Image (cartoon, rainbow, N blue to C red):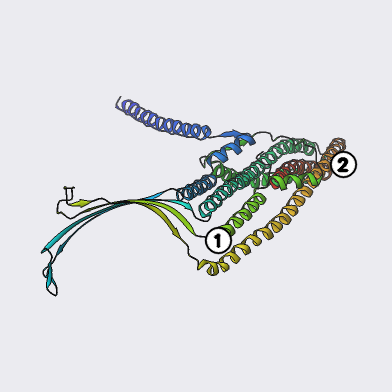
C-alpha cells in the first residue's frame, strides 16, 4: 500500500513538473509569436512613386537645403531694410562742479555758479534720398541668391530621387533573382527525384544523381549571396526613406518603359532648358554683373534728409520747468562724398569683372560636362535596350534547348550532364534577362536625371 502511494506521489510530482514546463514553453511560444507579429507588422510593400514621395518627405538633405533658402530670404529682407529710414533717441544727464568760478577781464569780472546741471535729450531721423543705387543693387543681388538657393533644392531633389530609384531597382533585381532561384530549386528537386528513380532502376549512374545534387548546391549558394545583398539594399533603402531599420520592404512590379527613344538632340535640348546647374551659372553671372554696378556706386555721393529734436534743461529735475529748458527743432539735408573712392575702388571693380568672366567660362565648362553626361547616359540606355532584346531571344533558345535535352534524357539519349547543363543555361538566361530589364529601367531614369526631368 505504501509503495503504491509513493508511486502515485511520484507520478503526481512528475505531472506537476510537466505542467510547469508546458506552461513555460507556452509562454515562450506566445512571446515569440507576438514578436514575429510585430516584425511582420513592419513589412511594407511600396511602389516606386510611393518610395520617391516618402524619401523626399523625410529627406534630411532637403530640409537642410530648405533652411538655406530661408537664410537667403532673410538676407534679402535685410537688404530691403537698409533702405528704410534710420532713427535714434538718446538722453544724457551731467552735473558740473566748479571750484574756481571767477573770471576777471581787467576792470570787469565774471562769476559762475559753484555747480551746474544739464539734461540733454536728442531724437533724430534720417531718410536716404540717393545712395548711388547701392540699396537697389543689394536687393537685386540677394534676390538672385534666393533663386540660386532654390535651384540647389531642385538639384538635391533630383539627386535624392535618383538615389531612391537606384536602390529600389537594385532591390527589385535581387527579389526577382530570388524568385528565379526558388523556381530553379523546385525544378532541380524534381530532376533529383527522377534521377534517383532512374538510378534505382539501373538506367543512370550514381554520378548522374550527384551531378544534379551539385547543381542544386550551386543554386543554393547563389540564393545565400542574394539574401545577403537583399539585406544590405533593404537597410540602405530604409535609411533613404526614413523608415525603421527593421522594416522589410517589398517592391511592386516595376513599370515597363514604353517611351519611344528620341534622337540625342532632343535630350540635349531638354538638359539645356531644365538642368539647374546651367540656370545657376546664369544667375551667378547676373550676381557678378550686379557686384560690378555696386562697386561703381561706391564712387558716387550720398544724399539724405534729416530731422532732429533737442531737449536741453539746466535744472536738476529732468522734467520741463518753465524758464529752465529749450527745445530746438532741426531739419536739413545731409550730403557726403568719399571722392577717394574714385581711385581706391578701381582694383575692386577689376576683381568684380574677373569674377564675372569666370562665371561665363564656368558656364562653358558646365555645358560641355552636361553634353558628355547626356550622351553617355543615352548610349547606355540604347545598349541596355539592345541587351534586353538579345536576352529575350536567348531565353527562347535556352527554353527550347532545355525542352529537347529533357526529352532526350527521359529517352536515355542524353546524359545527366547534358540535362543539367541545359537547365543551368536556362537558369542563367532567366537571371540575365531580369537583370537586363532592371538595368534598362535604371538607365532610363539616369537619362531623365541628366536631362533635368526626373521629377517632372
Instruction: Out of 49 and 193, give the one closest to the viewer.
Output: 49
* Inter-mark Cα distance, 1 to 2: 88 Å
Note whether 18 is above or below 373 in the view shown.
above
Q: Quadrant of the C terminus?
A: top right
Q: Which mark is residue 414?
A: 2
Label 2: few (<14), some (14–19) or many (≥20) C-alpha neighbours in 10 Å: some
Callout 2: SS: loop
Q: Which mark is residue 295?
A: 1
Foreground mark, 1 or 2? 1
Q: Residue furthest top?
A: 1
Q: Residues within 10 Å of mark 1 (few under 14, many from 20)?
A: many
Of 158 and 166, nearer the camera is 158
Residue 97 position by quadrant: bottom left
Residue 107 at least partly seen: yes
Looking at the picture, does residue 18 appear above or below residue 82?
above
Q: Earlier in the sequence, mark 1 or mark 2?
A: 1
In what element is the residue under mark 1?
A: helix
Tell me residue 134's x, y (percent): 52, 55
Marking on residue 94: none
Give left or right: position of 20 versus 94.
right
Left or right of residue 367: residue 401: right
x and y percentages locating residue 377 in the rendered image: 75, 49
Which residue does the image show at 61% across and 36% down from the upper left?
250
Quarter placement of the N terminus: top left
Q: Position of residue 41 (x, y in %)?
A: 51, 32
Q: Report the number of numbered marks.
A: 2
* Residue 102 visible in this rendered orientation of the protein: no
Lateral position of residue 233 relative to residue 442, left or right = left
Most extreme residue toward the front is: 107
Among the 4 quarters of the image, the one containing residue 406 = top right
Amino acid at each position: 500500500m505504501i509503495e503504491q502511494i509513493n508511486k502515485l506521489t511520484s507520478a503526481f510530482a512528475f505531472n506537476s513538473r510537466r505542467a510547469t514546463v508546458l506552461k513555460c514553453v507556452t509562454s515562450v511560444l506566445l512571446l515569440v509569436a507576438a514578436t514575429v507579429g510585430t516584425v511582420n507588422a513592419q513589412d511594407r510593400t511600396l511602389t516606386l512613386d510611393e518610395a520617391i514621395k516618402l524619401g523626399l518627405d523625410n529627406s534630411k538633405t532637403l530640409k537642410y537645403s530648405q533652411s538655406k533658402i530661408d537664410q537667403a530670404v532673410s538676407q534679402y529682407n535685410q537688404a530691403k531694410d537698409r533702405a528704410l529710414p534710420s532713427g535714434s533717441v538718446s538722453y544724457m544727464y551731467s552735473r558740473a562742479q566748479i571750484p574756481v568760478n571767477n573770471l576777471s577781464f581787467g576792470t570787469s569780472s565774471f562769476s559762475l555758479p559753484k555747480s551746474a546741471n544739464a539734461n540733454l535729450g536728442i531724437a533724430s531721423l534720417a531718410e536716404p534720398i540717393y545712395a548711388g543705387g547701392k540699396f537697389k543693387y543689394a536687393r537685386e543681388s540677394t534676390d538672385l541668391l534666393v533663386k540660386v538657393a532654390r535651384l540647389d533644392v531642385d538639384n538635391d531633389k533630383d539627386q535624392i530621387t535618383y538615389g531612391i530609384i537606384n536602390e529600389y531597382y537594385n532591390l527589385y533585381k535581387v527579389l526577382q533573382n530570388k524568385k528565379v532561384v526558388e523556381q530553379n530549386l523546385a525544378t532541380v528537386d524534381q530532376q533529383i527525384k527522377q534521377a534517383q528513380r532512374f538510378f534505382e532502376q539501373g538506367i543512370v549512374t550514381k554520378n548522374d544523381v550527384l551531378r544534379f545534387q551539385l547543381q542544386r548546391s550551386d543554386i543554393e549558394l547563389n540564393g545565400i549571396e542574394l539574401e545577403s545583398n537583399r539585406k544590405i539594399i533593404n537597410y540602405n533603402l530604409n535609411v533613404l526613406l526614413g523608415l525603421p531599420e527593421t522594416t522589410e520592404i517589398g517592391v511592386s512590379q516595376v513599370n515597363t518603359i514604353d517611351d519611344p527613344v528620341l534622337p540625342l538632340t532632343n535630350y540635349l535640348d531638354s538638359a539645356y532648358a531644365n538642368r539647374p546647374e546651367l540656370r545657376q551659372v546664369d544667375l551667378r553671372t547676373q550676381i557678378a554683373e550686379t557686384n560690378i554696378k555696386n562697386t561703381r556706386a561706391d564712387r558716387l555721393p550720398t544724399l539724405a534728409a534729416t530731422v532732429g529734436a533737442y531737449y536741453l534743461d539746466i535744472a536738476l529735475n529732468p522734467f520741463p520747468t518753465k524758464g529752465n529748458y529749450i527745445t530746438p527743432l532741426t531739419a536739413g539735408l545731409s550730403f557726403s562724398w568719399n571722392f577717394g573712392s574714385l581711385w581706391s575702388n578701381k582694383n575692386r571693380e577689376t576683381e568684380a569683372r574677373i569674377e564675372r568672366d569666370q562665371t561665363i567660362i564656368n558656364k562653358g565648362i558646365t555645358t560641355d560636362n552636361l553634353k558628355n553626361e547626356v550622351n553617355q547616359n543615352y548610349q547606355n540606355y540604347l545598349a541596355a535596350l539592345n541587351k534586353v532584346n538579345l536576352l529575350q531571344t536567348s531565353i527562347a533558345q535556352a527554353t527550347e534547348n532545355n525542352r529537347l535535352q529533357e526529352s532526350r534524357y527521359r529517352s536515355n539519349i542524353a546524359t545527366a550532364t547534358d540535362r543539367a547543363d541545359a537547365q543551368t543555361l536556362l537558369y542563367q538566361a532567366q537571371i540575365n534577362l531580369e537583370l537586363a530589364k532592371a538595368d534598362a529601367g535604371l538607365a532610363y531614369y539616369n537619362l531623365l536625371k541628366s536631362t533635368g526631368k526626373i521629377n517632372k
